[in-house]
Image (spheres, grey):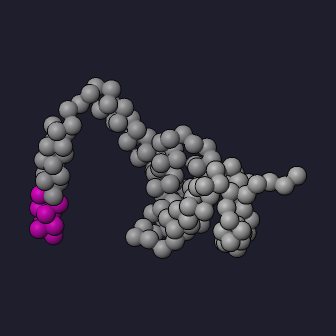
């Protein structure tokens, strides 16, 4: 039984060279999006960007945990481990993701005014900067 590929032969060869195989799940991406989907994954996940592999792994773990995706969680935990992220750093990342989701639920559920939230956040950031500057001056 021949499986229809989601990519052109050149892209399929590139995926095999890069990952050692074409993951079976990639064959379920609609053909018109195949090459493009690989390009996004390759360039953002594996490519050299403004973020380090370590940062990408931690972000991936946090997002995967927040959206409750076991596939993404597994992949990004392994990605982070390849970048020497420790288990305690992974735990902290998941805790931060859960905190963000918790407060997002609170803000949305209570229909907090966005303009007021933005203004309060600006005041808080200014205060934190002042505290940081004062602490630096005390050294």
Report the predominant secondary structure element of the magenta stretch. Answer: helix
Q: Quadrant of the C terminus?
A: bottom left
> Is 50 located above or below residue 5 in the figure?
below
> Is 7 located above or below residue 10 in the figure?
above
Toward the right, the furthest residue is: 1
Q: Of 69 and 80, which appears nearest the observer?
A: 69
Q: Of 86 and 51, which appears nearest the observer?
A: 51
Total labels drawn: 0
Toward the top, the furthest residue is: 110
Q: Of 34 and 52, which appears nearest the observer?
A: 34
Q: Is residue 112 left or right of residue 122?
A: right
Quick check: can you spot residue 84? no
Magenta stretch encompasses residue 121: no
Q: Is residue 43 left or right of residue 31?
A: left
Q: Is residue 45 left or right of residue 118?
A: right
For image coordinates 63% across by 47% down, the residue present is: 71
Position in image of residue 126 (x %, y %): 13, 53
Position in image of residue 82 (x %, y %): 59, 66
> Is 46 located above or below residue 27 in the figure?
below
Q: Is residue 44 left or right of residue 100?
A: right
For image coordinates 50% across by 41% down, the residue present is: 67
Quick check: can you spot residue 62? yes
Magenta stretch encompasses residue 135: yes
What range is drawn magenta here?
Answer: 130-139
For image coordinates 52% across by 47% down, the residue present is: 64
Toward the front, the furthest residue is: 32
Position in image of residue 86 (x %, y %): 53, 60
For image coordinates 58% across by 49% down, the residue present is: 72
Position in image of residue 55 (x %, y %): 45, 63
């Amino acid at each position: 039984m021949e499986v229809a590929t989601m990519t052109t032969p050149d892209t399929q060869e590139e995926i095999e060279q890069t990952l050692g195989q074409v993951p079976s799940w990639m064959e379920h991406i609609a053909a018109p999006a195949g090459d493009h989907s690989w390009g996004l994954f390759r360039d953002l996940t594996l490519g050299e960007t403004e973020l380090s592999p370590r940062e990408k792994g931690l972000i991936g773990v946090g997002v995967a945990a927040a959206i409750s995706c076991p596939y993404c969680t597994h992949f990004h935990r392994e990605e982070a481990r390849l970048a020497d992220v420790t288990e305690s750093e992974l735990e902290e990342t998941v805790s931060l993701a859960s905190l963000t989701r918790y407060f997002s639920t609170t803000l949305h559920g209570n229909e907090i005014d966005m303009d007021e939230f933005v203004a309060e956040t600006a005041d808080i950031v200014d205060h934190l900067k002042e505290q940081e500057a004062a602490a630096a001056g005390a050294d």
